[in-house]
Image (cartoon, helix red, strand yellow):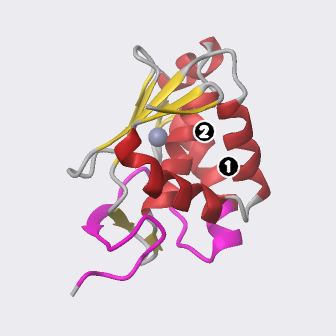
Amino acid sequence: MVHYGSLDVAASARRDFDQAVAYLSQDPVERALFARLEHGAQHVTLTTNRHDADYYDPNTHAIHWDPHSAMATANGGRQSPALGLGHEVDHAVHDGPREWQRSQTFDPRYDTAEERRVITGSERHAAHTLGEGTRTDHGGATYRVDSPVAMALIA
Ligand SMILES: [Zn+2]
């Protein structure tokens, strides 16, 4: 594990993580989320996988991330794997009773109120800054890319 303050990153994930953070940090909202993640009272762990599994587990305080999984949105946009990491970091730094309540609150468009908060908040803000696609739902089709900051399909 490599320590970034209160965040532990699997050594094998370090390069992809650093690249994603450098890219996302062009957006002030993302920059603030990562600063909060690395200076929190709660210890969080980041591990990577190769099966499109991006999620935050509040029970283990673990972020799971596939650094080569990009997403095609329903409205024809594309999102980098890095933006997927930023999405999960927002869940991780807002891991309290209010967010738990939101995650239990159905939303007809975004599945839950917590997903609506993240998708229409930090995710959309960063997408605009970085020139990526935005989502108007909680869905998307994953595809493989060469790097965490890529959106081009691998031929
Ligand atoms: Zn989410």
**Residue 113 visible in the shown view:** no
**Residue 11 visible in the shown view:** yes
> Which quadrant is home to the C terminus?
bottom left
Q: Nearer the viewer, residue 146 or 9?
A: 9
* Left or right position of 86 against 57: right
**Residue 90, numbered circle:** 2
Q: Is residue 40 above or below residue 152?
A: above
Residue 82 belongs to magenta span: no
Give me the residue at 67% from left, 42% from top. Answer: 34
Q: Type of residue at label 1?
A: Gly
Q: Type of residue at label 2?
A: Asp
Q: Is mark 1 within 8 Å of ligand 1?
A: no
Give me the residue at 56% from left, 39% from top. Answer: 89
Pointer 1: what residue? 121
Q: Is mark 2 within 8 Å of ligand 1?
A: yes
Residue range (magenta):
126-154
Asked whether the beta carbons under mark 1 and mark 2 sit within 8 Å of each other, the answer is: yes
Question: Which element carries disc 2, helix, strand or loop?
Answer: helix
